[in-house]
Image: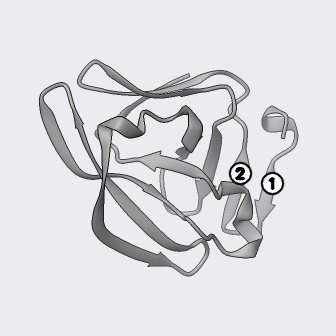
Amino acid sequence: MNGTANPHKIGERITIKAPGTRARARFKGETLAESDSALVLLETGYPPRFYFPQEDVRMDLLSRSGAKTHCPFKGDAAYWSLTAGGETLENAAWAYLDPLPEIAIIAGHLSFADQVEIET
């Protein structure tokens, strides 16, 4: 994927594209993720979400929670809680460990809750 020139469209509901620049996720002054390979998921009715490759995420700041959700367009999501800057944010990150085939491109990527600041 090369920036917005080549978006990956999943039906009429979801489009995925590369942001075209380095993306960083921060919480309470702590960098959680930084990547040149993040994806931006645009889903009808929701704000844009950055999905960072797991290898670019500070997994040492995350602990797997028992929370799970199901999306009919993406599949089952697993959640992690975040501890950074002296604060814990429950279910602050999620990933689709085995996404539906149409959206397999997000496998191995994590996204963050609204409380996490995304910089590009």
Query: Who's the residue at 63% across and 70% down the image?
Result: 99
Q: Is residue 65 above or below residue 108?
A: below
Q: Residue at x 67, y 62 (%)?
A: 14
Q: Is residue 11 visible?
A: no
Nearest to the observer: residue 99 or residue 10? 99
Q: Is residue 1 above or below residue 43?
A: above
Residue 31 visible: yes
Q: What residue is at 46 percent from the left and 68 percent from the top?
A: 77
Residue in the image at 71% along x and 51% along y: 16
Task: Give how far across and how far down residue 83 sits, in percent.
Answer: 22, 38
Q: Position of residue 36 (x, y in %)?
A: 67, 26
Q: Nearer the viewer, residue 44 or 50?
A: 50
- Which corner quadrant holds the N terminus? top right
Q: Amino acid at mark 1?
A: His
Rendering colour mode: one colour
Mark 1 touching mark 2, by CB under 8 A?
Answer: yes
The numbered dot on residue 16 is 2
- Residue 64 in percent (x, y) is at 32, 57
Residue type, numbered disc 2: Ile
Judged left or right of residue 6, residue 99 is: left
Q: Say which residue label 1 marks.
A: 8
In this rendering, position of residue 94 left or right of residue 110: left
**Quadrant in which the C terminus appears:** top right
Vertical position of residue 78 compared to residue 40: above or below: below
Quadrant of the rendered structure where residue 26 is?
top left
Residue count near mark 2 (Cα–Cα under 10 Å), binned few <14, some 14–19, many ≥20: many
Marks 1 and 2, how far apart in space? 5 Å
Label 2: which secondary element: strand
In the rendered structure, the answer to whether residue 80 lies left or right of residue 58 reads left
Q: Residue furthest front?
A: 60
Residue 12 vertical position relative to residue 83 in the rendered view, above or below: below
